[in-house]
Structures are given as structure tokens and as C-alpha cells.
Image: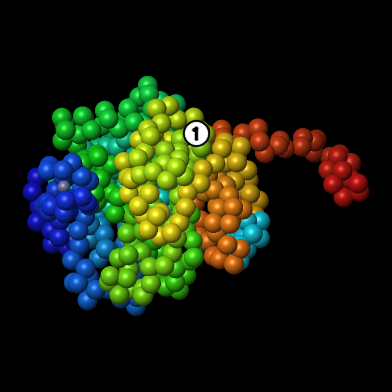
Amino acid sequence: MHSHSKGFFTGLKCRECGRLYPAEATHVCEFCFGPLEVDYDYATIKKAISREKIASRPKSMWRYKELLPIEGEPTVGAQVGFTPLVKADRLAKELGVRECYIKNDTVNYPTLSFKDRVVSVALSRAKELGFTTVACASTGNLANSVAANAASAGLKSYVLIPADLEQGKVLGSLVFGTNVVGIHGAYDQVNRLCSEIAGKYGWAFVNVNIRPYYAEGSKSIGYEIAEQLGWKLPDNIVVPMASGSLLTKIHKAITEMKKVGLMKTTKCRIHGAQATGCAPISHAFKNGSDILKPVASPKTIAKSLAIGTPADGYYAIQSIRETGASCEDATDVEIIEGIQLLAGCEGIFAETAGGVTVACAKKLVANGTIAATESIVLCITGHGLKTQEAIAGHCGQPRLIHAKLSEFDEKIYHADFKK
Ligand SMILES: *Cc1c(COP(=O)(O)O)cnc(C)c1O
Ligand SMILES: [Zn+2]
């Protein structure tokens, strides 16, 4: 499959040695084994894009299409992105900061996680490259998004997941009629198998051979945060990390906005958040190291973040350092408290990854990394209805009564108001 780029992207480039590659379904440099990344003609984009032009377009992530790696118009996920940036005053007070916003990807279209962003780019590009079967290795949300978007695009799909995922995530793939394959093992084993299958059958694995295009979709969160703040950056962004890709791409988005003249500054600290039971990036950062120690068997309720060998962990640490930021990790108890704090303060029900982000933000403020005078944006990346078992038994029970006013008076009203 061969293609000559007609868009604003010029091809792929090795992140390590800088060698250029055509815009094909490939992701590793043949010379140094570095990861390939999409390369753009920023001078041309600078002439083509402006704040006004972006503002005139529909409210989806595709309003930044010059900075996304497809040649034509998007054919998958035209409605994805531009999720609400919610001013979270009550949460700000609880955390102890001046200003807090939630980038609310719990309501991203169509599968309620930020993964719809990466998948809409990956599948649009896979179609341009002529693929008819798409696939992924997933910790759950990616599988849901590939399944849904492939269904609506009429593509055949296979999603491979660790066998022990939450029911909501498994059902949330099966319903679309995709082929769900549960693997006895952790995500790293799923991913290794997917690399072998991709090589053998020539499918478009969104996060293997299509990964350079897929990963670019995450940049849209960065552009949206800036635009929704009136083309300003917050002092801090807190980002949950699995492979570490989302964090590195928010950083790339911020540097690009300056390159193409949308912003004058890149000043913004991008902090990473992980679950303590699978925190190879956070632990390396805290040890002052660039070397990630793989986590062979993750033990955390934040299954969506449970990647023991994060593909972009090294680059995530670079981004965190370069922006002057830090890393934290949260235990299962803290994750549940984080979910409840966000729900109780802002009426937003996040999945376990959201609990990780809130809990880590709380720690970053408490330990003085984020000052009380600063602003924070929290990336809340997935919906809580998909990970219900994580909080089941932690939120109390309904009080049961018969349908009698006297019983309501006595057992509910009196108990609550006449104490
Ligand atoms: C996949 C995922 C992430 C992190 O993704 P990476 O880009 O691999 O770091 C964060 N939150 C949720 C809910 C996810 O599903
Ligand atoms: Zn290279």
C-alpha cells in the first residue's frame, strides 16, 4: 500500500534519528528502531490556519484538521471531540487552588472516552490507506471505540483485550458486533500478540502499525483546552498515563500552536498521573531516572491505565521534565475517593482513570508542586458507567421504604431534617 501525502503532513519521521518515511502503515524506524511520528509542513499550515478560521468551523476535533494526519476530509468520527471544558469552582476549593477546569471527555462521542479522538484519526487514515479490517490491543476504552467507529464505517474489526476487564468495557465492545478476543494475560502480552498478528495478516492495528496517525488524535485535547480558555494556557494540566502517549501529544499540541502562530507562549506544566499498582512512569520520574522498570502484573482498579511497559513512557518523562512538571500516583482507595470527589463537587461521573487524575492533582497541590495561586485543567478521560464494579459497595445503598407518605415522613424526612 503506497500513498503520497496531499495534506499538510509530509510523511513520517523517526523521533530518534530523524530519517524520513512515506506516509504508510508503519511505525518503527528500520535503522534505529525509534518510533515514527507524523511530520508536518508547519510553514504552510501557518498560512492556512487562524483562530478565526477555526472558530468558523463545526464544534468537533476536526476544526484543527490542518494539524491532523489525513489527506482528505475525515470519513470516520466527524462528530468526535470539542467536549466541554467545565469550570469546576467547587472542586477547586476542595483541591485548594484558585482555578480548576475539567476537560470532560466522559461525554466524548460516541463511546464516552478520549479514545474516540485517536480512533477517528486512525480509521480515517486506515481507509485512506486502503484497509478493510481494523484491530487494536486495548485496555478497554480503545476496544469500545474501534468497535463502534468500525461499525459505523462498515469496516471489519477485531479487538484484543486482557480477559479480566470490567463487564461494561467488554459489553461495550460486543454490542457493536465486533470480534472480541480475550487474552489470558496482561496488556503487554496482548500487545505483543497484536504485533505478530499485524505483521502476519496485514490488518490496520490502530495502536500498532497505524500508531503514528492514531497518536496524533490526542493532540486535539491540547488545542481544545487552549481555544476554550480563550486562547490561553492554564498554569498546569494533569494527564492520566497508560502508554504515556496522551501526555506527550498534549505537549506536542502546545508547541505546535506556537509554531503555526495560534499562540505566543508554550508555558504550561504538564503533570502525569498513574495508579500506584501500575506506575512505571511515575516511579521512574520520582527516582530521577529515564529508565522504566516494567510492571509484570499490574494490580490496580484503574485497568484502563494498566500498561506495564508504556511505549511512550520515556518521552512522557521528557515532556514532564521539559515543562517543569511532576508525576504522582494514586492507590485504589485514593482512586475511589477521587471519583467520589469529582462526582460530588461537579456532577461528573468518571471512570477509574478520572479518579487517578483527581487524586494525583490533589497530591500535587498538597505537596506544593502546584501552588494555591495557580490554575489547573484536569483531563478526565472516560465515563464511570463503564467501570461500575470499581465503586460498587463504596457509595452506600438506597434507603428502601413502602409507597406510603407516613413511611417517608418517618424514615426519610424526620431522619434527615428533625434530628
Ligand atoms: C487509554 C486511556 C488513557 C491513557 O492513554 P495513553 O495515551 O496510552 O497514555 C487515559 N485514560 C483513559 C480512560 C484511557 O482509556
Ligand atoms: Zn531512526
Judge the density around disc 1: few (<14), some (14-19), many (≥20) Cα neighbours within 10 Å.
Answer: many
Can residue 120 be seen here? The reply is no
Whole-percent x, y for residue 19 in the image: 13, 52
Number of marks: 1
User: Where 42 falls versus 206 (above or below)?
Assistant: below
Residue 33 placement (x, y as % from top left) = 18, 41
What residue sits 32% from the left and 59% below the top? 252
Q: Nearer the viewer, residue 13 or 61?
A: 13
Q: Amino acid at mark 1?
A: Gly
| Residue located at (26% from left, 28% from top) | 193
Q: Secondary structure at mark 1?
A: loop
Disc 1 CB within 8 Å of nearest ligand 1 atom? no
Horizontal relation, residue 384 to residue 31: left or right = right
Question: Residue 42, relative to residue 344: is it above or below?
Answer: below
Residue drawn 32% across the image and 35% down it: 137
Left or right relative to 414: residue 229: left
> Tell me, what colour scheme is on the image?
rainbow
Residue 69 at x, y percent in the picture: 23, 57
Q: Residue furthest top?
A: 184
Residue 286 shows in this picture: yes
Q: Is residue 60 left or right of residue 355?
A: left
Residue occupied by mark 1: 277
In the foreground, 231 or 165? 231
Where's residue 235, x and y in %? 49, 65
Q: Residue at x 58, y 50 (%)?
A: 363
Q: Quadrant of residue 292?
A: top left
Quick check: 400 left or right of 261?
A: right
Q: Locate residue 139: give its quadrant.
A: top left
Quadrant of the frame with the N terminus: top left
